[in-house]
Amino acid sequence: MMKKFSLIELLVVVAIIGILGSLLLPTLGKARKKSKQAVCLSNMKQIGSAEFMYQDDNDQYHLVRDNEVYTQYNGWQFLLAPYVNNDGTTAQEVQSSGVFACPSSQLNFNNEWQNGGIGYNTNMGSIQKSIQIAVNAVEVPVETILTADGDEAGGAVHLDNQIFQPGSPHGEPGARHNGGVNTLLADGHAQWYSKVQLMAGKNGNQDYYYMPTK
């Protein structure tokens, strides 16, 4: 004869399941964030590969933050788009898809001034300012940032398209990945830095990681 469960027994089972669920949910949430961080870091590496191809086609000069058409700091994605199979035709289409989109970003992708959450180092060249930086002019490529998580809490909506050194009045490094920032360095490798480390700089220079010459 099949044994029937009492109401108390059923309530105990439900309570145990509830307790287990409450214990597992934070762990699953952390795992999800870690997964998104890994995807973002992979995107950075692919941007680095595209950057190297761009350099080969442009006399070994680094990418700049803007271009002749999209001059307000969001043009760098268009310059790299052909190298990453991104065939978007509008700012929103290019910036919010593929390797240019961080899965942890909370930006409004319908705003042409906001991209996918990855910004380009404003110190690495600008067509508007007629500044281009040769690859061999970067003194410490392994510690010079090209792209990084953009600040989503800054005073201007376009801040995420470019990144600023900690000493700049325009914004701080983004820190959406477990209190830190995913970055692409000028030598082509991608790395996570804690926000504390980037804000502190190095060798007494707060802007150290953002400047092509140290």
Image: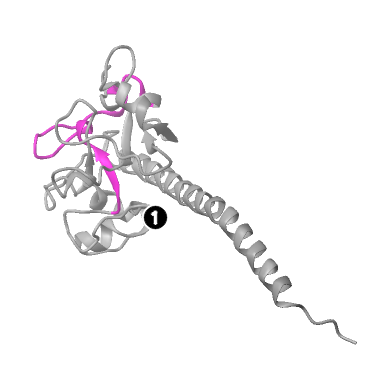
In the displayed structure, 74 sits above or below 214; it is below
Quadrant assignment for the C terminus: top left
Which quarter of the figure has residue 213?
top left
Q: Which residue is mark 1?
A: 103
Query: What is the x, y in percent for residue 75?
Result: 19, 49
Q: How many marks?
A: 1
Scheme by which the image is coloured: one colour
Choose between 137 and 103: the one closer to the eye.
103
Which quarter of the figure has residue 187?
top left
Choose between 3 and 158: the one closer to the eye.
3
Which quarter of the figure has residue 66?
top left
Query: What is the x, y in percent for residue 208?
Result: 29, 21
Q: Residue at x 40, y 25 (%)?
A: 142
Q: Residue at x 31, y 35 (%)?
A: 146
In the image: residue 91, left or right of residue 33? left
Q: Does the magenta-highlighted stretch encompass residue 125?
A: yes
Q: Residue at x 43, y 41 (%)?
A: 178
Query: What is the x, y in percent for residue 135?
Result: 30, 28
Residue extending furthest right?
1
Query: What is the x, y in percent for residue 55?
Result: 31, 38
Q: Residue at x 17, y 29 (%)?
A: 168
Q: Does the magenta-highlighted stretch encompass residue 9?
A: no
Quadrant assignment for the N terminus: bottom right
In the displayed structure, 205 sits above or below 143; it is above
Q: Callout 1: few (<14), some (14-19), or many (20+) C-alpha neighbours within 10 Å?
A: some
Q: Name the secondary structure under disc 1.
A: loop
Magenta residues, as a range?
116-141
Residue extending furthest bottom?
1
Q: Amino acid at mark 1?
A: Pro
Choose between 204 and 161: the one closer to the eye.
204
In the image: residue 161, left or right of residue 139? left
